[in-house]
Amino acid sequence: MKSCVTIALVPSIQTGPWIYWHDLSTSMAKAADLGFDAVELFTPSADAVSIDRLMALSNQFGLDIAAVGTGAGKVLHGLTLTDPDPAVRSRAVAFISDMITFGARFGAPAIIGSMQGNAVPGVEKEQALDWLAEGVNILGKRAEEQGVNLIYEPLNRYETNLINRLEDGVTFLKSLEARHVVLLADLFHMNIEEVSLADSIRSAGSYTGHVHFADSNRRPIGCGHTALTDVAAALKEMDYQGYISAEAFPWPDPDEAAKQTIAAFKQYFG
């Protein structure tokens, strides 16, 4: 298992569950100094960060790019894969496709979280799930062509009414034609939805391809009441070898949050 910390690079967003903010070079330098293996990026678009610059920084600091988030497609442009308007769904697919291509240059998968959207009033859930599957099938095949996986993230009930638990995420993935799609096990969302975080991870097994490392209150691990010992045991039992990525609030500040995160990672996975 490898440690990872998040960096938000969207100037118009000032709050959210990312540890480092805005300054890519400084953030990567700090992550490297603390001993993180990788960074996960949240960018406004696929062309917001120069490929050459990111490659140079990755080499300079010895950090991998673990994944790229796509949530700016919804936050900035209102795009989701389940919008009733087919033109909006098409633009959502195009936005995520561009992010897949960007991430693939670094072997990094793109994450579909908030861009999955919702079954809005007047749309049956089954129809929204069909639209979601249609988009994820297209994008999963695109990821395969680029030599990476696509990551799908179940979210808690307050963020989506589609798929909230890992078990339902597995069922969804099994229904797809695309085979290069994996689940993101986000411990914050799971704390709301799952009866047992550890048992849910065990049941999902190899379908889990990425883990978001945040406590029950979405602060860094160790600042809430999530029982990490059982979660760590479950991940070790299934021989999980992916990233443990801190998508958490920068509490009390980014530097302290990063220090707390790497200390927790070493405690449970080191």
Image: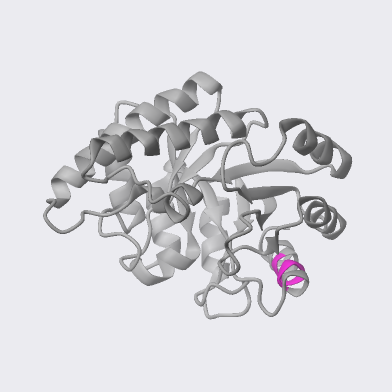
Residue 89 locus on image (x, y percent)? 31, 38
Question: Magenta stretch containing residue 170, yes or no?
Answer: no
Segment colored magenta: 257-261
Vertical arrangement, residue 28 with respect to residue 56, above or below: below
Nearest the camera: 2 or 181? 181
Q: Quadrant of the C terminus?
A: bottom right
Residue at 79% from the left image edge and 52% from the top image edge: 28
Along the line of sight, which residue is nearer the eye, 209 or 257? 257
190 left or right of 45? Answer: left
Whole-percent x, y for residue 3 in the image:
69, 53
> Nearest the camera: 12 or 112?
12
Q: How many marks?
A: 0
**Does residue 195 appear in the picture of this structure?**
no
Q: Is residue 168 left or right of residue 38?
A: left
The image position of residue 97, as x and y in percent, is: 47, 31
Up-down relation of residue 203 to residue 95 (above or below):
below
**Measured along the vertical axis of the image, is residue 125 above or below residue 64?**
below
